[in-house]
């Protein structure tokens, strides 16, 4: 940056936020130009100036990380990418890219993943995997720590490396006396945060179970004597069990202690926040009775394992009207726009743990959301996670879709993505929700595809034949057995890397699957307008290459033919929009 540019930046900073943002935008464009031309030193200086003016500029952090990576400054790159991910949590949804980034900025991590995978199921010690630093090397990689604390690890190789490192840290912590190294504590805390997020789905060896029991006895004895336990003992225990599962008096004692920052975060995650969720139960409205046998069984499942577990919802962007959203997604579709009103009444049916209604409230201008679910545990998680700025726009309530007429409200939009296929009779529930939709209103529907779920069906049969139970131990054992079987491809289904996810995927008490002809028949019988399927651009391009013009995009017979030839097309469910006449 030259002297003139520095003076401009200083002037912008002193002139106020608007001027600073404008100058940051100008500098970012110039930095990107310098980066494109290969002038990496100049680009790095400009990106640093952008971040001085706008510390939350995620793209500048990401681009600066790319510059550092190209320069071979791997430690700096890790720090910048960690910041970019913290600012844009939706990037975690593409975990394959995140994992590739972890390895790119830390080649030793990639080598350790390869060694752990090659030796599995034998557990290699940390020093053999990561050199003299061993498992404590986790603490020196801010990008890896950011990933472990912010999202569920969705890579088998990385999972196996972390499983080995967790066992190594457990042994070190158990023999460390009352004082442990800060790096060891930080590594234990990062893994404890990850294991709580995935609900302790990592494989556990019998010797680890014995050591954990010994640590728990040691913790109990220390607390019984009125002393504060060593931080590394608490952190190591938290890698294997939620601290909230300790006896209530012990969990309360952990809340009152003065912990180092990494462990304070673990105690908040594993004790304080679950307590906050339980305290919210009386405040949730019970909108309908839950009496149907299948509904009761589904409710029990999600009370035991609220789904999905998540840490960060997608960052807020400028909200748009529903009409704008649909026109952008389906530019050639024939639908009748909603009347231009200030408020959009939205029902999110089967809202789970709240990520979806939060993102709906952020997406649509003027949205007022009623989010319903069978499970109070899921609703409590959702309500705790709802940002204060959205608290007056989202109402949570316990209800059964089959009794949704008792809600006695009408909605402009009904979101039913991922709930109807957990009813004994999905079409009955679908009709019940349509009855709440205003004339001209829209419904967003998600349903399982019979063709795309064939691997899941086979895995469910494998589990049933071997008698695995939907408990934490049963789910852990079933996952490992599947990974050692010809059915290991089921791990690509997505919901395989957490206990509640895996139960939802492979142990669900009720699953129905559909075909496109069944969907077409229901749409015709109810005089609905099919607006279109949601897809990533490559799928749409492939379809157009087969069937041609835009009018074919809403031809369900052609989509059925396309799916017959490409049975994995709807691996992420049939996701589509309809409009009520």
Image (cartoon, grey):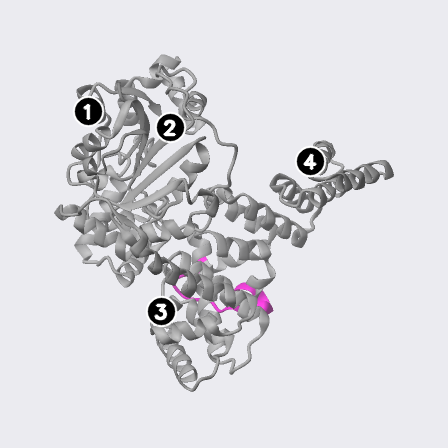
- Magenta-drawn stretch, dominant element (helix, strand or loop): helix
Query: Badges 2 and 3: C-beta atoms under 8 Å apart?
Result: no
| Residue that carries the numbered disc 4 in the rendered image | 18
Q: Residue furthest right?
A: 3
Secondary structure under badge 1? helix
Mark sitting earlier along the chain (1/2): 1
Estimate the spatial distance between the alpha carbons at disc 2 and disc 3, rounded to whole Å. Answer: 43 Å
Whether residue 129 appears in magenta in the rendering, the answer is yes
Estimate the spatial distance between the alpha carbons at disc 4 and disc 2, rounded to whole Å. Answer: 37 Å
Q: Which mark is residue 522?
A: 1
Secondary structure under badge 4? helix
Mark sitting earlier along the chain (4/3): 4
| Residue that carries the numbered disc 3 in the rendered image | 205
Q: Is residue 263 above or below residue 328?
A: below
Estimate the spatial distance between the alpha carbons at disc 1 and disc 4, rounded to whole Å. Answer: 53 Å
Residue in view at x 42 percent, y 37 percent: 361
Q: Position of residue 68 (x, y in %)?
A: 69, 46
Secondary structure under badge 2? loop
């Amino acid at each position: 940056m030259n002297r003139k540019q520095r003076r401009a930046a200083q002037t912008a900073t002193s002139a106020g936020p608007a001027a600073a943002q404008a100058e940051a935008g100008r500098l970012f464009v110039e930095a990107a130009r310098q980066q494109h031309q290969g002038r990496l030193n100049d680009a790095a200086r400009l990106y640093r100036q952008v971040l001085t003016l706008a510390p939350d500029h995620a793209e500048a952090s990401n681009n600066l990380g790319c510059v550092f990576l190209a320069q071979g400054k791997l430690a700096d790159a890790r720090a910048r990418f960690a910041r970019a991910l913290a600012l844009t949590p939706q990037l975690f949804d593409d975990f394959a890219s995140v994992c590739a980034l972890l390895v790119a900025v830390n080649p030793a991590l990639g080598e350790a993943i390869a060694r752990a995978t090659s030796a599995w199921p034998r557990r290699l010690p940390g020093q053999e995997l990561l050199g003299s630093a061993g498992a404590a090397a986790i603490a020196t990689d801010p990008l890896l720590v950011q990933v472990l604390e912010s999202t569920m690890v969705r890579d088998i190789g990385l999972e196996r490396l972390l499983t080995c490192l967790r066992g190594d840290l457990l042994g070190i912590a158990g023999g460390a006396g009352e004082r442990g190294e800060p790096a060891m504590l930080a590594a234990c805390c990062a893994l404890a945060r990850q294991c709580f997020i995935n609900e302790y789905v990592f494989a556990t060896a019998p010797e680890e179970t014995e050591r954990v029991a010994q640590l728990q006895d040691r913790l109990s004895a220390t607390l019984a004597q009125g002393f504060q336990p060593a931080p590394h003992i608490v952190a190591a225990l938290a890698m294997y069990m939620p601290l909230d599962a300790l006896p209530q008096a012990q969990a309360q004692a952990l809340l009152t202690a003065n912990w180092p920052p990494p462990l304070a975060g673990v105690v908040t995650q594993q004790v304080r926040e679950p307590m906050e969720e339980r305290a919210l139960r009386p405040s949730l409205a019970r909108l309908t009775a839950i009496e149907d046998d299948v509904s009761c069984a589904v409710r029990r499942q999600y009370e035991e394992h609220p789904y999905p577990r998540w840490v960060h919802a997608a960052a807020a962007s400028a909200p748009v009207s529903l009409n704008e959203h649909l026109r952008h997604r389906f530019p050639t579709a024939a639908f009748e726009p909603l009347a231009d009103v200030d408020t959009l009444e939205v029902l999110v049916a089967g809202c789970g743990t709240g990520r979806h209604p939060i993102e709906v409230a952020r997406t649509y201008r003027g949205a007022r959301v009623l989010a319903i679910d069978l499970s109070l545990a899921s609703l409590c998680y959702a309500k705790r996670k709802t940002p204060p700025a959205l608290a007056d726009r989202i109402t949570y309530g316990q209800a059964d879709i089959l009794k949704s007429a008792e809600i006695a409200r009408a909605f402009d939009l009904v979101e039913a993505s991922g709930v109807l296929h957990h009813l004994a009779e999905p079409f009955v529930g679908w009709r019940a929700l349509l009855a709440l939709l205003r004339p001209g209103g829209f419904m967003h529907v998600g349903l399982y595809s019979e063709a795309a779920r064939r691997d899941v069906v086979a895995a469910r049969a494998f589990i049933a034949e071997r008698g695995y139970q939907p408990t934490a131990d049963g789910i852990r054992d079933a996952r490992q057995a599947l990974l050692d079987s010809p059915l290991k491809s089921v791990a690509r289904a997505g919901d395989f890397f957490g206990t509640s996810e895996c139960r939802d995927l492979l142990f669900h008490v009720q699953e129905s699957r559909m075909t496109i002809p069944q969907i077409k028949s229901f749409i015709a019988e109810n005089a609905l307008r099919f607006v279109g399927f949601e897809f990533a651009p490559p799928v749409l391009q492939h379809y157009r290459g087969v069937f041609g013009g835009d009018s074919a995009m809403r031809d369900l017979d052609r989509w059925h033919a396309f799916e017959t030839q490409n049975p994995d097309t709807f691996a992420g469910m049939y996701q589509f929009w309809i409009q009520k006449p």
